Amino acid sequence: MTTMTGQPTMTTPSFPKGFLWGGAIAANQAEGAWNEGGKGLSLSDLTRGGLLHDKMDPAVDPGAYYPSHEAIDFYHRYPEDVALFAEMGFKCLRTSIAWSRIFPNGDETEPNEAGLAFYDGLFDALLAKGIEPVVTLSHYETPLHLIRTYGGWADRRLIGFFERYARTVFARYAGKVRYWIGFNEINMAPVIPLAAAALELDDDLSPADRQSRLFQAAHHQFVASALAKKACRDLVPGGQMGCMLQLGGIYPATCKPEDVFAAMQVRRRSLFYSDVLLRGEYPNFIWRMLEEAGARIDIANDDLEVLRAYPADYLSFSYYFTTTFADGMPVLGNTGGIDGKPNPYLEASAWGWPIDPKGLRYVCNEVWDRYRKPLFVVENGLGAVDEVGPDGSIEDDARIAYLDAHLQQLAEAIADGCGVIGYTWWGPIDIVSAGTGEMKKRYGFIHVDKDNDGKGTLQRRRKKSFHHYRRIIASNGASILET
Ligand code: BG6
C-alpha cells in the first residue's frame, strides 16, 4: 500500500528490511578494567550500590567492593562476547565510550592513546562480524574530576570539554561508527541527577536552587548536544547523531481532569528535553514551569541559534514500563522511569517494574506523532533472577515472554506508521545493574557466572532466550509474529 504522497507503508505488523536488531550495554556496567589503559575515575567507579543512592564515596576505599571495577571484564573478554553476539545474528551493538578512557580527567587537551586504541579494537571486532556499533558518548559515567572540580553539568565549561571529546572520537572512528548518541537518558536528571547530569546536589538546597541547577545543567547539555551534532556532520561521513531519553509511558491515574492534566505535565517535563533536541527550540510551556519552580537559568547569546541550527537526527529511547500519575504526587523515579502509582491491570517484575508491552506501542505513536523523526528503541528488557539447572541450562521463559510481547507491540507500532529503525535489547549479556549495582538482576541472553559480591568464574553460558532471539533475528521478526 502507498500513502497519498507515494510513500510505502506497512499496515500489517512486521519489521522493515534492514531493521537494526541487536543489544545494548554501557561501558561502566560491562568493561571493568577501571584503572587500566590510563583510564581516569568516573562517577560509577565510586558508587557501590548503584546510582539510585546518588551518593559517591569521597575516594576509592581499598577494602570495599565496587561493582564497576571488574564488572563482567568485557574489556578483556570482548572477543568472546562479540562472537556470541554474532552467533545471535546481531546487526548492531549499542555500547558507550567511557569518556575517562579518552580524557582521564575530562579537561585535558590531548587524548589518551591507549583508550582510543581499545575502542579501535572493539569496533574492528564488531565490524569484522558484520555488527554495526551504535555508540553513546555519555552513559552515566562522567569523569569524576569534572564533578569534583567543576560541579558537573551546571558549569558551562563542560560544554567545551564535551565538544573536544566528541570531536576526538568522531575523527578517530569516522570510518567505523555511523550511529552516535549524545547523553543517555538525558531527561532523567530530575530523578537521578548524579547519573544523568553529573550533579552532586546537597540535600539542603532550596527547591528553587535545586531546579535552577537541574535546568542549567540541561541547558548546557542541550548546547553540548547541538555542538556534537555539528561535529558529527563535519567529521563523520553519513553520520547520524541521536538524542536519547527514558520514555517509560505515563498514564493518568484516573480520568479526573486534574489527574489527566497532571500526567500531561509530568510527561511534558520529560518531553521538554526531546522538544529542544529534536525541534531545536524551547517549548513555550517550559517558561511557565521554570517560573513556577522559581528557577533561573543563564542562556548565552548564541545558544538558541546553535540549538536551532543543529537538531538531533533521530530519537533513541529506553522503554521498560509505564506508570500512572495523579495530581499532587511528587515526581520520583529510578533507572526504569518515573515511579507513580501501581497500575492494577499490570503484573510487575521481581524488582517491581510493571510489565506493559502495549505501552511500547503507545509511546512509539506518541513520539512519532510529535516529532516525525526516526525512532530507535535502544533499551528494553527484563531484569530477573535466573536459576542455573544441574546441567547448566537456564530456562528463562519469563524473559522470552517479555521479549516476544514487546516486539509484537513494536511491530504493531510500525504498522501504525511509526518510523522505527531498530531495537536493541538491554543487557544481552548479564551486566551490573545501573540502579542497584547487583549482578542478580539479570537481563542477559548470555549468563555470566558472577554474584552480587563479585564472586564467580565469569564464564559465559547461553540461556534459552539466546536461541530464541537468534531465531527472531534470522526471520526478521517473523518467528514471533506468526504465533
Ligand atoms: C536504563 C539505563 O535506565 O536502565 C541502564 O540506561 C540501566 O544503564 C537500565 O542498566 C536498567 O536499569 P537497572 O537499574 O535495572 O540496571
Image: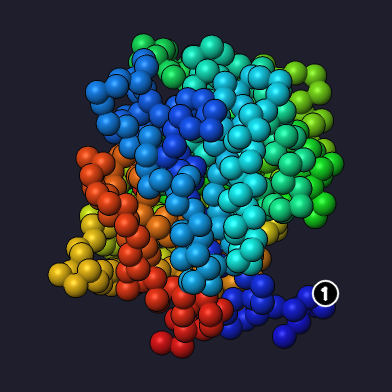
Residue 238 located left or right of residue 294: right
Q: How is the image coloured?
A: rainbow
Where does residue 424 sit, x and y in percent of width and height? 52, 60
Residue at x-position 27% and y-position 31%: 65
Count every numbered label the image shows and give the total. 1
Under mark 1, the amino acid is Thr
- Give the secondary structure at mark 1: loop
Which corner quadrant of the image does residue 455 belong to?
top left
Name the residue: 64% across, 63% down. Answer: 128
The answer to whether residue 279 is seen in the rendering is: no
- Residue nearer the viewer, 48 or 9: 48
Expressed as whole percent of the image width and height from the top left, the position of residue 48 reads 31, 31
Residue 98 or 213: which is nearer the viewer?
98
> As rendered, which of 42 and 162 lies closer to the eye?
42
Q: Quadrant of residue 166?
A: top right
Q: Is residue 446 left or right of residue 88?
A: left
Q: Residues within 10 Å of mark 1 (few under 14, many from 20)?
A: few
> Pointer 1: what residue?
5
The image quadrant where one finds the N terminus is: bottom right
Q: Residue 192's spot in the image, x, y percent?
A: 42, 32
Q: Is the residue 441 above or below the residue 475 in the image?
A: above
